[in-house]
Image: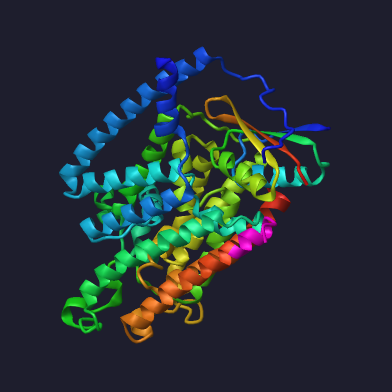
Amino acid sequence: MSEKKKYQFHELYLKKEWSYQTGAVLLALFSLALVIVTGKSWGVTGPLGMWGGWILSKLGIAVDTWAGFKATPVASYDIWKDLPALTNIGIVVGALLAVLLAAQFKIKKLKSIKNLWAAILGGLLMGIGARISLGCNIGAFFTALPAFSLHGWIFWISIFSGAAVGSKLLVKYFM
Amino acid sequence: MSDTTITIKRSTPKETPEQRARKRLIQFIASGVVLVLYILLAAFVQTKNPQGAFILLIGLGFGYILQRSRFCFTASMRDPVLTGSTSLTKAVIIALAISSVGYMALQMKATGLSLEKLGTDALKSVTQLPGHVRDAGVHTVLGGFLFGIGAVIAGGCASGTFMRMGEGFVQQWIVFIFFIIGSVIGMAVLPAIKSVPFLYQATPVYLPKLLGGWIPAIIFQFGMLFILYIIADIYGKKKSGEL
Amino acid sequence: MAEKTLDCLGEACPVPLVKTQKAMESMAVGDVLIVNIDHSCAMKNIPDWARSVGHVVEIEEVAEGEWNIIIQKMK
């Protein structure tokens, strides 16, 4: 009996998925807590370019001389002071904790070579797209649209149309 | 749905109850180890950045919330077209509305109720406001379009990629590597795009300023979100045959 | 009453859902489709979709983090 009770506790508090609405409300509140306390808003993709630049600079490529790195040179980049870098680490570990507590962690291998191509192409397109539009679905949308910025609305419409095209490509070539 | 004829529970479980209990215990212990390591990291970051531990805590919350509720921004924009489901789209709109209320309060404090502080020494540019008010233009459309294609093909947007890396998806670790490469390419080509006036408009458009005050901006923002919610609701019901 | 199994282990969203929708189209009313998944999102969006269309859905956890979604076509 006690065994059963323990499982119910596990099921209810650690495993059972929350509704999308619960997720929505909590995400909004956490995102607001972040900006209220730190004065800076949540973003995700900004650090990725800096990390890439850092790796290149370690390989001996002087990225700081590139025009694109002029405003934010790698030489003065400090990951521990970069808010999105820290929240990104948090997202990975938070999701890991959630699956471990639900006892659902498992390394999910690639199923086919198509998944590899999808990952390569998708990653490249997201990286390029995010830098051109100055943000991703968080920085140019989730903390831009609610901040009464027009580019958040434009970005939303654009992602929507991109996603429609992406769906067609996915069904046709990556399934 | 009570007159079901389905015969369920036929497939043999892959794990015995004992194996399951063991897995639970192992993963529970592992979660404790992860948590301790994370706290140590937070303590270290705190020495470098006075807000570090707090930011890491919020980040951890983001990851936990995203995973636990299976929240996915990509799906919210993909599913209406691909599967006809709008439940995530509606959830995103709710999140946007709540965030809007918060940002409205923060920004009103910064701009003043009739935007009188905007343009003064204290607040020279709208880009200094809380939240991301950034250049809007053709580049936004172009970037968003590429990003949308990429997110659907990769099986996750920016936050979704990080969340699934934590969940143990090998595919998302590969996405992560190429996301970095793509970001560097993007940073490298951005100055070239910025130099083409047609492609890049260096104009941050702030809705309260554009529409002439807080009241029309609030009506636009919440009105649009409300209308979109209704459309998503009707569309979703139509697609599933409820209407 | 036919029965079909769809192996979607290791596949990420939205692939399992799209494959499920396709498979359901080719099936007759009363047929049962069993979808094997280990993607936590698919575990939510496949049942959501199937229920919204009006099929009967059962979720079975065959192992921690691995599910069989059993869908019976109702219309």
| Quarter in which the C terminus of chain A is drawn | top right
- What segment carries the magenta color? B234-243
The residue furthest bottom is: B212
Q: Is residue B100 magenta?
A: no
Q: Is residue B241 magenta?
A: yes
> Where residue A16 sits in the image (x, y, percent)?
47, 35
Residue C32 vs residue B18, the one in the foreground: C32
Would residue A96 be found to the left or right of residue B52 on screen? right
Name which residue lies at 66% across and 39% down. Answer: A113
Residue A138 vs residue C56, the one in the foreground: C56
> Where residue B5 sits in the image (x, y, percent)?
74, 33
Magenta span: predominant SS is: helix
Would residue B104 be found to the left or right of residue A101 on screen? left
Number of marks in the rendered image: 0
> Where residue B231 sits in the image (x, y, percent)?
57, 68
Name which residue lies at 75% across and 46% down. Answer: C22
| Quarter in which the N terminus of chain A is drawn | top left
Q: Please identify the quarter of the rendering in which residue A67 is found.
A: bottom left
Q: Does any portion of residue B185 appear in the rendered image?
A: no
Residue A132 against residue C1 in the figure, above or below: below
The residue furthest top is: B18
Residue A78 vs residue A148, the one in the foreground: A148
Name which residue lies at 58% across and 53% down. Answer: B152
> Where residue C68 sits in the image (x, y, percent)?
64, 31
Specify how the rendered protein is coloured. Answer: rainbow
Q: Does any portion of residue C14 appear in the rendered image?
A: yes
The residue furthest front is: B3
Q: Please identify the quarter of the rendering in which residue B80 is found.
A: bottom right
Would residue B25 be found to the left or right of residue A154 on screen? left
